[in-house]
Image (cartoon, rainbow, N blue to C red):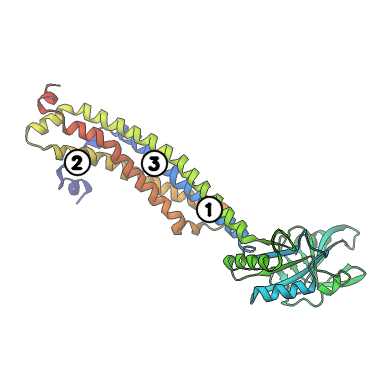
Amino acid sequence: MSITDLLWRIPSVGMAWRNLGRSRVRTALATLGIIIGVVAIASLGMAGVAIQQQATSNLGGIADEVTIRSGTDSTTDGVTREQVDRIRDVVGDATVIPEKTNSTTLTARDGSESFVSVTGLTRVSALYEVSSGDNPDRLRSGALLTNSTARQLGLEIGDPVEYDGQLYRIRGLIESGGGGFGGGSELVLPLSALRDQNHYDSVTVVASDGDEAQRISDAVETRFNEGNEEILSVTSFASIQENVGSFLDTLNLALLGIGSISLVVASVAILNVMLMSTIERRGEIGVLRAVGIRRGEVLRMILAEAAFLGIIGGFVGALLSLGVGLVAFEVLAGDATLVFGWASLRYLLLGFGFAVVASLLSGLYPAWKAANDPPVEALRS
């Protein structure tokens, strides 16, 4: 049984489906407007989700970290060992990683040089990801070097690098940008390599998640900084991620607003199509009323036409938007399958629902006008 046979079981719906086929060009143009509106809403919404996924992924590695440095009111140039012990008491089970920093110039066999930042710490695996080689939980000997610097100097795992007159063999190569916002060229050494520095330049606390990181940040602030004094400067990247998320949510709303304009324009086109259709068929509708068709049946027929335009346009627009979403997630988030998550699929449903509702609203006035047109006046025209 064809769709037309099924629709004709409901007279008003069957007539509506037939009427749309009588002026195919006008119907196609009205449907195209709906398709464009749905694609605008759904695609922009899904692109916003993809951007948010990318930002969350980039910040995910540091959202659970709290960085502590010497504050403006501190009497010491750095974080002392006593302060580190007190920080451990405050944070509980979270990982506390004191760090010392410096800089140096590494020289390759061919004489080429590279300026690198030097970080001395023990708990390497908690902050750095190693692309090749060893990633020790506790760094007691050897060194780690960023991939880009190793390639630039022609160094490999096992080659020696010199710092402060001492040689350290490369145990692993780390991704550029490891260890939070570091990035660039970096040489990671044991804390003992920077023994001449009395205090720590920073302390990184790695929490279980962003909420725990924020709690730790507040607890350290309360413990060390009283009133307007800043003994220790505390930075929680969880708050940065929250601010970025809030901004992206606002951006999504703005994008949806822009996309909605297209659908509003399409609704005006449907209103025009329905009005023209009812004017052209005024005599036909008058005949239907004269032979006993009720106002409600005429009303349902015109509304069904508008609903068909919204359903067809919404469905095609949702399919096209899904294709756009696959490309957007592949380019921005690096994984096209993320488009099938509820965060993005809801925009397909939103676009489709908006299309159907907007079409029905656009058909209300033409339907009311056709249903309430006196049969005698309609036949006379």
Determine which residue is flagged by label 1: 50
Mark 2 residue type: Arg
Which secondary structure, mark 2?
A: helix
**Amino acid type shown at disc 3:** Ile
* Marking on residue 79: none
> In the figure, is residue 196 to the left or right of 67?
right
Q: Mark 2, residues whose alpha carbon is within 10 Å: few (<14), some, or many (≥20)? A: some
Residue 380: name its quadrant: top left
Circle 3: is it few (<14), some (14-19), or many (20+) Cα within 10 Å? Answer: many
Quadrant of the image for the C terminus? top left
Q: Earlier in the sequence, mark 1 or mark 2?
A: 1
Foreground tag (1 vs 3): 1
Q: Nearer the viewer, residue 247 or 11?
A: 247
Which residue shows up at 15% across the image and 27% down it? 283
Spatial separation of the CA atoms under disc 1 and disc 2? 41 Å
CB within 8 Å, label 1 to label 2: no
* Mark 3 or mark 2, earlier in chain: 3
Q: Which quadrant would residue 89 be assigned to in this image?
A: bottom right
Work out which residue is located at the far front of the displayed protein and give it. Answer: 227
Residue 151 appears left or right of 297: right
